Structure formats: structure tokens, C-alpha cells
Amino acid sequence: MRRVGLVGIGNMGWGMARRLQGCGFEVAVRDIDPAREALAHEAGLAVLPDPAALASRCEALIVAVVDAAQTDAVLFGADGAAAALPPGAPVLLCPTIAPDDVERCAARLAERGLAPIDAPMSGGPQRALDGTMSLMVACAPAAFERTRGVIEALSSQVFRLGERPGDGARAKLVNNLLAAINLAGAAEALALADHVGLDPAAALAVIERSSGQSWIGSDRMHRALAGDLAPRAHTTLLAKDSRLALAMARAAGREPALGAVAADLFAQACREGCATLDDASLYGWLRRRG
């Protein structure tokens, strides 16, 4: 399986496309942003005019868009990919969306004779590019084996979570709720360090070698202290993901207290100017709040 189509070449999708290209796959892409498509063309990737045209020339499809509405449009809308894919083609569902949406989408794909693979991703654009991001995979064993070359090219951290569609999404939401808690905590702690007269960079150095360390805290706070808020992961994404995680929890009769606080902070930050910034902007926003 060498011909791969990828819809959605934002920060993560771009890293995935370049990774597959570097591993020798024939990669074709589609994005709603002409600037992203121009970037892909300059990099030697085939750019197709719509998802159906993309699907007609690939053996496997990767969907790396933002949300469930975009996923539905890519697969089942006008010029959707699902009707143009060859029988049995695997479809990797990589966005962070609600488990119910994954289940519904997977059922529609299966009805068309396609092979849905629930495969949300985590790790950031650089890890997508170098193949070290995480993939949380739930699918039929035959679909996994058929797509193993693509999956293992994309990720050296593949977590197989069984066959039930939606379990990849469930694992991703659990992870991202903790990511939101950890990032909110790191931003709040460094804002406090600044307010009590500590050098935030020195405080971060202490945290990174002590019990308060977290990967996302270190990654984002270094950027925040450098004033680098160019969006690798928009604040809106963790706001969305933490909201979806809370909805999943409530459907299961749970109410994660810390998760609710973190979700509320991200929602407020988005409303107050951070939505289109990198989520590292949470530090500056909390610092300004006093």
C-alpha cells in the first residue's frame, strides 16, 4: 500500500504528509486553505481539487481535519471521499472528535464496504514530522494489518486499543483532558512564580527537574517565556477537546472536577483573545489576570 491520500494539512496533517513522503509513499493531499495547498505543491505533493478526486487515486485515506462536521463533509458531503474510494480501502480517522461521532462515521464507512480505523493522534507537529507522535488505534485486526506500513511509518508509538470504533477517541479525550489540566497548572504556577518575584525561567528549570514536571508544561512554557506564540496547537483545540472529554464523562455519570476547571480556563482564554494563538498563550493570559 503505497498511494495515500490525506485530507487536512494543518499543523499535524502537514507533518504527517511530509513524513509519509519522506518514507517513500505517493502522497496526495487536499485542504480548504489555498495557502496550505500551495505549500504542498511547492513540496512536491500532489494536490487534488476535492476529496472525491483524492480518493479515486489512493489506496488508503487519512482524515486529519478539525472536527466532526468537517469529517462528515470530507467523507459524505458533496464530492465526498467515501463514494470514490476502492472497495475495502482503509480510512484513518485522526481528528479528535466525540466517540459517538466516530462510531457513527465508522458504521457509515463499513456499510460502504470500507475499513474504518479510529486513529486519533497526539504529540505536536514536530513529532508528526519525525514519526514519533502517538496513534491511539481501534479497528478490526485485518484493517490494521493491511494498513500496518502506513501506520508504523506515521508513528513509533502505536497503541492498539481493541476493535471497537470510538475507543481511540475515548483514549484521546482522556489524554487531552489531562493535557489541559497539566498545561493550565503549569501556566498558573509560572504566573504565580512571576507574581511572587521569581524568575519564571528559573522556576521552570526547577519544575522540569522536580515533581511538578509535565511534557506539555515544559514544551509550552518554554515557548511562552520566549514570546513565541506562533500556533502549533491553537488554544481552541484544547478548549474543544476538554469540552468533548467532559461531555463523555458526563454521559458516563462522572464529573471530573479538575477537568471542569481546566476546560473553563481554556474557554475563557479563547473568549478573551487567545483563540487563534498557540495554547502556550495561556501563561500570558493568566499572568495578566493577576
Image: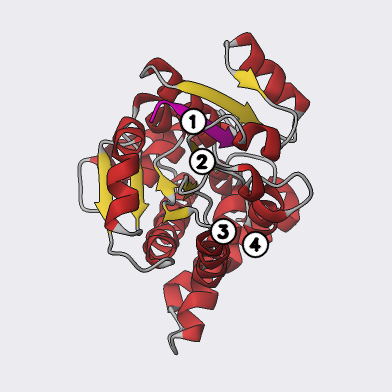
Mark 4 near mark 2, Cβ–Cβ under 8 Å?
Answer: no
Q: Please determine whether, in this image, residue 227 is positioned above or below residue 283.
A: above
Label 4 or label 3, whichever comes before in sequence order: 3
| Residue annotated with mark 2 | 62
Q: Please determine whether, in this image, residue 119 is positioned above or below residue 27.
A: below
| Location of residue 217 by image quarter | top left
What sort of colour scheme is used for the picture? secondary structure
4 or 2: mark nearer the eye: 2
User: Left or right of 136: which side holds 62?
Assistant: right
Q: Position of residue 66 (x, y in %)?
A: 62, 49
In the image, residue 55 lies in the stretch drawn in magenta: no
| Residue annotated with mark 3 | 112
In the image, residue 2 lies in the stretch drawn in magenta: yes
Q: Amino acid at mark 1?
A: Val
| Residue annotated with mark 4 | 267
| Location of residue 48 by image quarter | top right
Residue positioned most to the bottom: 253
> Residues under labels 1 and 3: Cα distance?
19 Å
**Disc ID at residue 4:** 1
Label 4 or label 2, whichever comes before in sequence order: 2
Q: Amino acid at mark 4?
A: Ala
Mark 1 near mark 2, Cβ–Cβ under 8 Å?
Answer: yes
User: Left or right of 70: which side holds 59?
Assistant: left
Front-lying residue, 290 or 25: 25
Q: Mark 3: give few (<14), some (14-19) or many (20+) Cα within 10 Å.
A: some
4 or 3: mark nearer the eye: 3
Which range is magenta?
1-8
Magenta stretch, main secondary structure class: strand
> Residues under labels 4 and 3: Cα distance?
38 Å
